[in-house]
Image: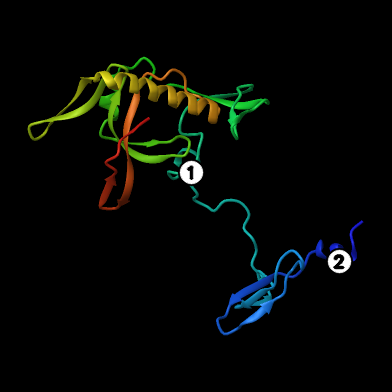
Amino acid sequence: MLTAEEKRRNTWGTSTRFTYDPNHVATYPSSLPGFFPDIHRCTCVMKPFHLPTLDGLHLVEGLCDGVFLGASALAGFPSLNTLPYTAVLGYHAVNVFQSESRNKSMIIHIQNRFESQKGQAIAEEMVGKRTFVGWPYLQEGMVVAVSDNLFRYEKVVFGTDQEKILAQPHRQEWLSLWQRKVEKIESIYSKRFGVIVGQTDMLVHVRPLKGSCPYYTHYTSTELSL
């Protein structure tokens, strides 16, 4: 039931290039009179544009040689290959656009490789070293402390060259704050991403990477609890 003009507009046309020219002043007619006005003092030059050909070249399909994938991918690229996990299809009411999904979702269960380890041992392994946070969208950061629901484990320097991980008891106000952080992490990953992180017994406190070059690496002074 389309008119001839409507049918013509629904066909493939010629690509158009618009170029700014301050010396070209004209009136561009409305593309839909009665709805859109004419453009007065238009300084754009409209010319047909034909896409260039490959001129004997051929398209190389697939990824380039040497591309980093999976666990070797550069930071910032999402990957499921950096942490051990299992996945199952089921109902989980993942929150999508402020409403819970009624259909099945692929739910990821993260395997805890630090299970049964104490906070002191985890801190000695991680504090002062770089890590990647924000899984699966990885960002580099430096671990400054590890905490559980009772203690914060961080590195203390004695003298000039002696370092030791000490456990500092939480202040009273930090106890409830620690628990709220844990609940927020578990809830966001579960309801927003469909990722089950399990019971969170430890928080890792990280300073995100701000900038880096071959001679200098700078981490922010802002600490994140993850």
Numbered marks: total: 2
- The residue sitting at 64% across, 76% down in the picture is 40
Q: Is 41 drawn above or below residue 169 in the view shown?
A: below
- The residue sitting at 44% across, 26% down in the picture is 185
- What is the quadrant of the N terminus in the image? bottom right
Q: Is residue 21 left or right of residue 165?
A: right
Q: Which label number is shown at residue 5?
A: 2
Measured from the top left, where is residue 13 in percent x and y?
77, 68
Badge 1 or badge 2: first in the primary sequence: 2
Q: Which label number is shown at residue 77?
A: 1
- The residue sitting at 33% across, 17% down in the picture is 117
Tell me the quarter of the picture where residue 10 sits: bottom right
- The residue sitting at 50% across, 38% down in the picture is 79
Tell me the quarter of the picture where residue 149 sits: top left
Q: Is residue 222 left or right of residue 187?
A: left
Q: Residue type at mark 2?
A: Glu
Residue ranking furthest to the bottom = 23
Q: CA distance from mark 1 to mark 2?
A: 47 Å
Q: Is 223 drawn above or below residue 94 in the view shown?
A: below
Q: Is 188 drawn above or below residue 54 in the view shown?
A: above
Q: Is residue 179 visible?
A: yes
Q: Which label number is shown at residue 161?
A: none
